[in-house]
Amino acid sequence: MRGNRGNNGTTRLRWVVASQGAVQVILLSLVPVIARECGLGPGAIGSLMGLGTMFLMVASPAWGHASDRYNRRPILLAGLYGILLAQVLFVALLVMLAEGIVAGTSALFLLGFSRALYGCCAAGIYPACQAWTVEYAGRGRELPALVSLSAAANLGRGLGPVLALAGLAVGGLWALGWLVLLPLFCLLAIPGDRESGRAPGSAAPAVHSGLPPLSLFAIALLGTTVIGQLQLALGPVLSDFYGLGVREAASATALLLVAAACCGFVVQSTLVNKLADSRTVLALGAVLLMAGAAIINAALGNRGALLGLFTLVAGTALLVPGYTALIAAHYHSGRGRQFGRLTALHTGGYTLGFVLGGWIYHWAPAAPLAGLLVGATLVASITLYALGRERRPPTGKTAPRPVE
C-alpha cells in the first residue's frame, strides 16, 4: 500500500512541478503580445518580472522551513492558492489595460503587487515538492526521485511554448488563460495523503554525504549563472553571429529553448537513471558543462556551436540532480529549508547570469559567451576538487561512509 501510495504521490508532484515550469515559459513567450496589446514597454515588463523573481528568491528559505515544521501538503496548498489569486489579478489587470479600463500608475502598482504576491507564493512550491518526493522515495533513493522531478520541470518548460502557441491561435490575450488554468490543475494534482511529510517536531538523525554542503551550494550558484548568461545572450548571438533578423532570431531562440528542455528531459529520463551514484552524476555533469561551454566559444558563428549547446544542456541535466541529491543525503532532517536555500540560490544565479551576460556582451562583443567558459570551468574545478578531497581522508581518520 505504501509503495502504491508513494508512486501515485510522486507522479502527482511531478505534474505540479511540470505545470509550474510551463507557466514560467508561457509568460516569457507572451512578452511581445503583452507589450503590444497592453502598451507596456520593455522596461515596465522587465521590472515586473524582476519584482516577482526578487520576492521568490527572498521567500524560498522561509517557505522551505515552514514545510519542515507544518508538513508539505498544507504549504503546497497555501502556495498554490496564493499563486491562483495572484495570477487571476495579473491576467485581469492585463485584460483591463488592453481594453482601456485601467491605465497609468495605478495599473502598474497593482501589476507589481500581483507579481510580488506570485513570487512570494511560488517560492514554496519547488522546495516542498523536492522534500516530499525524497520522503516518498526513502533513504538511498534520493537521486532517482529528484531526477524524475527535474525531468518533469524540463518537460513543462518544453510544453510551455506549445501551450502558448495554442492560446495565441485563438487570438488576443486568450493565451494568458493558461496562467490561471495551470495553478487550478496543480491544486487538483496535490497528493491527498495528509500524513505524508515530516510531522512537526520530529527530527531524524542527520546523514552526511561526505561532500561539504558549501561546495554543493557554490556549484548550484555558478551553474545557474552559466545558464542565465546563455539564456540572455542566445537571441543577440543568433542575430550578430548568424545573420538572423530580429523576428527570425526570436523564433530560433524559442525553438532552441524548447529543444534544450527536451534534451534535458531525455538525458534525465535515460542516462541519469543508469548512473546509480550521485557523485558520478555530479562529476560527469560538471565535465560536460565545461566541455559544452568550450565548444560553444570555439565554434561560435558556425553550426558546431549547436553541439556545444546540447553538450552544455546535457551537463546541466546531470549536474542539477547530482548536487541536489547529495544535499538531500546530507540533511536527513530540515530538507525543506535546505531546498528553499537551493531555490533561492538558483534564482539568484539566473539573475546574476542575466546581469553578467549583458555586461560581457557589451564590453566584449567579439567573445560574448566567454563568461560561460569561466563559470563552467569554476564549476568543474570545485566539483573535482571536492570529490578528490572526499576520497582522501585526513591521516588518522576514516573516510565518511557513502549513503548511496
Image: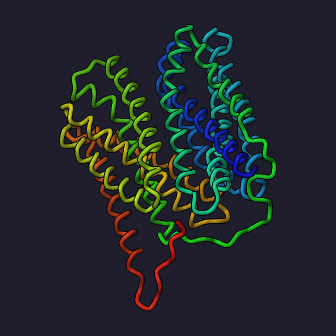
Quarter location, residue 309: top left
**Is 244 on the left-hand or right-hand side of 391?**
left
Q: How many marks?
A: 0
Q: Position of residue 384 (x, y in %)?
A: 34, 65
In this view of the protein, which residue sits in the foreground, 343 or 96?
Answer: 343
Q: Residue 382 vs residue 41: left or right?
A: left
In percent of width and height, residue 58 lies at 61, 49
Taking depth in this image into account, of 349 and 252 the one nearest to the observer is 252
Question: Residue at horizontal 29%, vertical 52%?
Answer: 290
Q: Residue furthest front?
A: 1
What residue is at 60 percent from the left and 59 percent from the top? 338
Residue 271 in view (yes/no)? yes
Foreground residue among 237 and 326: 326
Residue closest to the eye, 81 or 322: 322
Image vertical order of residue 23 relative to residue 379, above or below: above
Residue 331: give x, y in percent of width and height: 61, 66
Is the image coloured rainbow, by chain, by secondary structure, or in one colour? Answer: rainbow
What is the x, y in percent for residue 274? 44, 52
Q: Where is residue 83, by image quadrant?
A: top right
Q: In the rendered view, would you say 324 is above or below 250?
A: below
What residue is at 33 percent from the left and 59 percent from the top?
Answer: 380
Confirm whether residue 44 shows in the render: no
Q: Is residue 335 left or right of residue 220?
A: right
Taking the spot 20% from the left edge, 35% from the top edge, the residue there is 304
Does residue 310 appear left or right of residue 69 in this picture?
left
